[in-house]
Image (tube, helix red, strand yellow):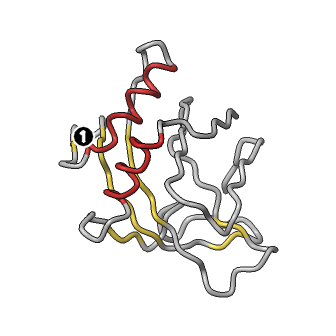
Amino acid sequence: MIVVDDFLPKEQFETMQSFLLGADFPWYFLETVSRPPGSYVPPGAIETFGWFHNFYSKEDNSKSFALDYITPLLDKINDLENGTADFIRVRASLKTQKKGFTDKHYNVPHVDYDFQHTSVIYYLNESDGDTWMFSEELQFP
């Protein structure tokens, strides 16, 4: 895992943040953000709802009108990969507090794909919760 503070220049970050967190940006509701409804949930984990916006999906060949707003981020990621980044999906996620959550709970572990890949998380705001990275390979019954 690599953590990079101030990944984008301040002006690019603020432009992207203002657009994505603005009143006119379209977010789409998901009842479960980690796994399909009815999937296995480990002890202590609580599934939560949230919102998403897909900017790009190689799987279904779709692109959002908003893709241009995050191009500086994608370009910088591609630069780090020496121009070889192969994006499968680019998605924004928005989660809110879960009523009744305590320090003994955590969100259901999220796995993007069941094949080898690299994920990038880029935060647009401060959070009142931690991001947990699980070091072991998750095995679900």
Q: Quadrant of the C terminus?
A: bottom right
Residue at left 46%, top 64%?
A: 94
Residue at the bottom extreme, as displayed = 100
Amino acid type, mark 1? Asp
Q: Quadrant of the N terminus?
A: top right
Is the residue 54 above or below the residue 98 in the image? above
Element under label 1? helix
| 67 and 17: which is toward the camera | 17
Residue at left 40%, top 43%?
A: 11
Is the residue 115 above or below the residue 56 in the image? above
Q: Dot 1: few (<14), some (14–19), or many (≥20) neighbours within 10 Å?
A: few
Whether residue 90 sits left or right of residue 37 in the image: it is left
| 33 and 19: which is toward the camera | 19
Name the image quarter holding residue 106: bottom right
Q: Position of residue 78 (x, y in %)?
A: 43, 23
Q: Position of residue 93 (x, y in %)?
A: 45, 58
Residue at left 75%, top 73%?
A: 105
